[in-house]
Image (cartoon, rainbow, N blue to C red):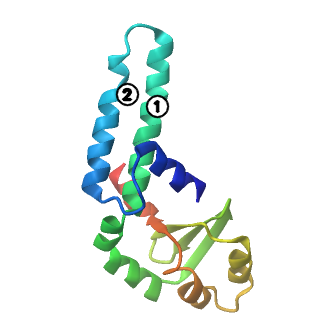
Amino acid sequence: MKKIIDYRKLLGVNKDAELQELKTVYRSLMKTWHPDRFTESNETKLEAEEKSKTIIEAYHFLVSIAPETLLQSAEEYTFTTANAGIHDFEYKAQVLKIYFSDSNVYEYFDVPKEVYRKLVNADSPGRFARRHIFNTYVYRSLNKLTASA
C-alpha cells in the first residue's frame, strides 16, 4: 500500500523496524520539526505544524501494524476471526474494513478488488475471509486506535 510505503519513507525505516526503532526515529524527527522551534516566521511555523502532524500520523500508523503490536494482540485477533461472525464490511481504495459481531473492527490493506468481489459473492463470507483474507493481508485493529486516542 502506498500509504505504508510513504510512511516508512518519511520516518526512514524499513519493513522490519521494531517498536523501539520507530520510537527513536519518531522522537528525533519531532525534535527537529516541533513547531515551537520555528519562531522566525508564521509561514515556517505552519509548515512545521503540518510536518509534525504527518510524522505523528505516520508513527501511530506504523506502530499499529508493527509485528510486535500484532503479536501482542494475536490471541484476541485469532479468537475474533475464528469465533465472531462478520457483521458488516466496507471496501475503499484497497482497504477492507471488517466489523465483527463481537464489536471488533479490523482494517486489511492492499486487498485486491477481485478478492473483495469474491467476499461479497461468497456463500459464507466468514469462511471465505478465514481462508483468503485474515492471515494474508497486513491488518490493524481499529478498536485499539480508538481506545488509545
Amino acid type indicated by mark 1? Lys
Q: In the rendered image, which quarter is residue 26 located in?
A: top left
Q: Are marks 2 and 1 in contact (CB under 8 Å)?
A: yes
Q: In front: 121, or 8?
A: 8
Farthest-out residue, top:
40
Would residue 148 be found to the left or right of residue 139 on screen? left
Instruction: Judge whether 43 appears above or below 141 on screen.
Output: above
Q: In front: 8, or 59?
A: 8
Instruction: Judge whether 21 appears above or below 88 on screen.
Output: above
What residue did someone put label 2 on?
33
Residue at the image position 37 percent from the left and 61 percent from the top: 144
Instruction: Judge whether 31 appears above or below 116 on screen.
Output: above
Query: Which element type, helix, strand or loop, lies under badge 1?
Result: helix
The spot of residue 96 in percent (x, y) is 61, 68
Residue at the image position 49 percent from the left and 29 percent from the top: 50
Would residue 113 be found to the left or right of residue 20 on screen? right
The spot of residue 53 in percent (x, y) is 44, 35
Q: In front: 83, or 44?
A: 44
Instruction: Judge whether 79 appears above or below 113 on screen.
Output: below
Amino acid type indicated by mark 2? Trp
The spot of residue 135 in percent (x, y) is 48, 81
Residue at the image position 42 percent from the left and 81 percent from the top: 80
What residue did someone put label 1 on?
51
